[in-house]
Amino acid sequence: MDRPRVSTHLYLPVTMPDGRSGDAVGVSEEHGRSIMTSLPRAGAVFATGFQWWWVVPSESQVGLMWPSTARYWTGACRPGPQRRGRLPRLAPRLIHWPDDDATPYTHPLLLYIAVCRLAGVPPVLSSPAASGCDYR
């Protein structure tokens, strides 16, 4: 019996202010609710099923070791494929949009610290050289 195809890409319907694609960090709905109340400013947050996705600038994973309770998705914020008919079962739904409407991004370091705290692990930052960055 053929199984239905599952999308292997996350598409969040966000237009980035700089015109580039953005990334997303996924956490459980339970963790998402806790994070929402702990951040000074939350950017755009979407849900697919029981997963909450936080919009972050591209390459926000560089130098960070996200805990296993989070999923980092590169290039998540870009137009999805055109679909005919009804929406897919796990189409992203908007949970939160920032009040200031300045940018859809959540500050990635503050999000990272909140995710680590909920996972019960210390935040680990790698050195710029280890992440491939050169700050000379």
Image (tube, helix red, strand yellow):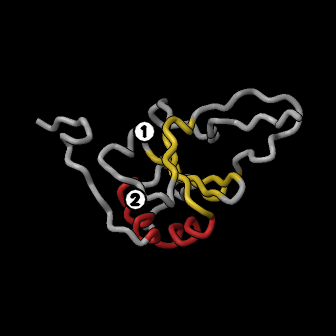
> What crowding class fits label 1: few (fewer than 14 Cα within 10 Å), some (14-19), or many (20 or more)?
some
Q: Position of residue 28 (x, y in %)?
A: 60, 62
Query: In the shown orientation, is residue 70 left or right of residue 121?
Result: right
Residue in view at x 57 percent, y 65 percent:
32
Residue at 58%, 33% (x, y): give it.
Answer: 78
Q: Quadrant of residue 60?
A: top left
Residue occupied by mark 1: 58
Q: Which of disc 1 and disc 2 is earlier in sequence?
A: 1
Q: Mark 2: give few (<14), some (14-19) or many (20+) Cα within 10 Å.
A: many
Callout 2: SS: helix
Relative to 85, is 97 above or below?
below
Circle 1: residue type: Ser
For the residue labelled by badge 1, is the local secondary structure a helix, a strand or a loop? loop
Q: Is residue 2 above or below residue 69?
A: above
The dot on residue 24 is: none
Q: Position of residue 57 (x, y in %)?
A: 43, 43
Q: Which residue occupies the extreme left position in the image?
A: 136
Tell me the quadrant of the picture where the N terminus can be found: top right
Residue 112 position, x and y percent, is 40, 59
Q: Which residue is pictured at 69% across the width and 52% down the height?
A: 48
Amino acid at pointer 2: Tyr
Between 95 and 5, the residue placed more toward the observer is 5
Say which residue label 2 marks. Answer: 112
Location of residue 82 in the rendering, given as x and y in whole percent from the top left corner: 75, 27
Q: Residue at x 52, y 46 (%)?
A: 24
